[in-house]
Image (tube, grey):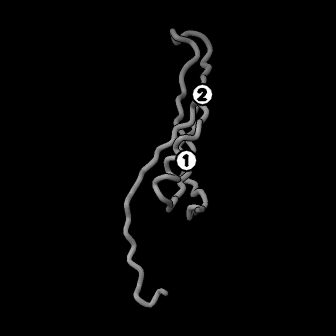
Amino acid sequence: MVPERKSPVRMPTKIFRITTRKTPSGEGSKTWDRFQMRIHKRVIDLHSPSEIVKQITSISIKPGVDIEVTIADVLVQLPRNYL
């Protein structure tokens, strides 16, 4: 059984920036270091049985990659004339 899915939806990229002086004492030329961290998120909606969700969550993932799984039981009522 192939789960129904929607392609990955890109969420806005979060950019955290820190600008700091290179010299700790404040003396000397005014040189600055700029650091930034970018966080990229994707959202994938899967409509599948719990067995398939268990298989998906058991995949090994590289360090530094975080995955959040939310499981929601949703009952969908179809219109009477759907079939």
- Above or below, 11 against 75 in this view is above
Please name whichever residue, 51 or 6, is drawn nearer the observer in this view of the structure: 51
- Above or below, 56 against 29 in this view is below
Could you give the CA–CA distance between mark 1 and mark 2, rounded to whole angstroms? Answer: 38 Å
Q: Which residue is mark 1?
A: 56
Q: Could you tell me residue 81's position as x and y percent?
A: 44, 90
When asked about the image quadrant of residue 76, the answer is: bottom left
Q: Could you tell me residue 71's position as x and y percent?
A: 41, 53
Q: Secondary structure at mark 1?
A: helix
- Above or below, 81 against 77 in this view is below
Q: Could you tell me residue 78's position as x and y percent?
A: 42, 80
Q: Which residue is mark 2?
A: 34
Figure quadrant of the N terminus: bottom right
Q: Could you tell me residue 43's position as x and y percent?
A: 53, 54
Image mark for residue 72:
none
When asked about the image quadrant of residue 61, the answer is: top right
Q: What's the residue type where badge 1 is placed? A: Ile
Please name whichever residue, 14 or 81, is drawn nearer the observer in this view of the structure: 81
Instruction: Write the residue at 54% across / 27% down.
Output: 19
When asked about the image quadrant of residue 80, the answer is: bottom left
Instruction: Write the residue at 54% across / 47% down.
Output: 55
- Above or below, 39 against 7 in this view is above
Q: What's the residue type where badge 2 is placed? A: Arg
Mark 2 crowdedness (10 Å alpha carbons): few <14, some 14-19, many ≥20: few
Q: Secondary structure at mark 2?
A: strand
